[in-house]
Image: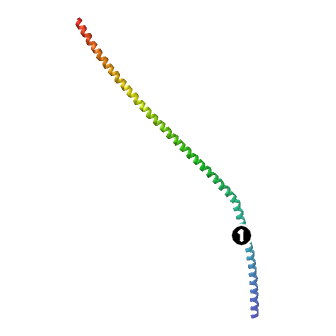
Amino acid sequence: MARAKAVSEMADLAQLRSVIAQLEATIRVLRGELEHERNRGESAVREAHAEHATEIAALKAMIDTMRGRLEQGEKAGDAAVQSVRAAGRSEAAELQATIVALRAELEAERERRSNEVSDREQAFERERVVLEDQIRALRAKLEAVT
């Protein structure tokens, strides 16, 4: 029986070795497949990166171009705003000068009309005095005749 047990143990050991060998072979195959898939994945990533790197570079160039145009437009807009502001200030100064000149002209016209009214009033007063003197003289003559 001991011999049968030893033979049985040897058979079990041989069977275990066979299973271990099969497992090791399976592990090697799986490692090979895993390595192959890893290489394929890395290759796909490199291809995608290369494909997208060109697109990314084109997009970056487009962004830089658009940024340059935007900055030029902004500078042109700022210059236009400054020009409009300067023109507005110039026009405001002209209008202010015109207002001052018109006010002076209006004041001179008021003064002239005031002097004219005063002169006419004085002339009317002198004429009234002369007419009153004539009326008195004519009344005196009329009374002397009657």
Q: Is residue 36 above or below residue 138?
A: below
Q: In this view, does 130 lie above or below 3?
A: above
Residue 134 percent across, percent down from the top left? 28, 12
Residue indicated by mark 1: 38
Q: Which of 16 and 57 is in front in this view?
A: 57
Which three-letter amino acid code belongs to the residue tagged 1?
A: Arg
Report the number of numbered marks. Answer: 1
Task: Report whether residue 1 is seen.
Answer: no
Q: Nearer the viewer, residue 30 or 67?
A: 67
The image quadrant that residue 79 belongs to is top right
* Outermost top residue: 146
Q: In this view, does 122 lie above or below 89?
A: above
Tell me the crowding category of disc 1: few under 14, some 14 to 19, or many 20 or more residues within 10 angstroms, Cα based.
few
Residue that appears at 52% across and 42% down: 86
Residue that appears at 48% across and 38% down: 93
Residue 125 percent across, percent down from the top left? 31, 19
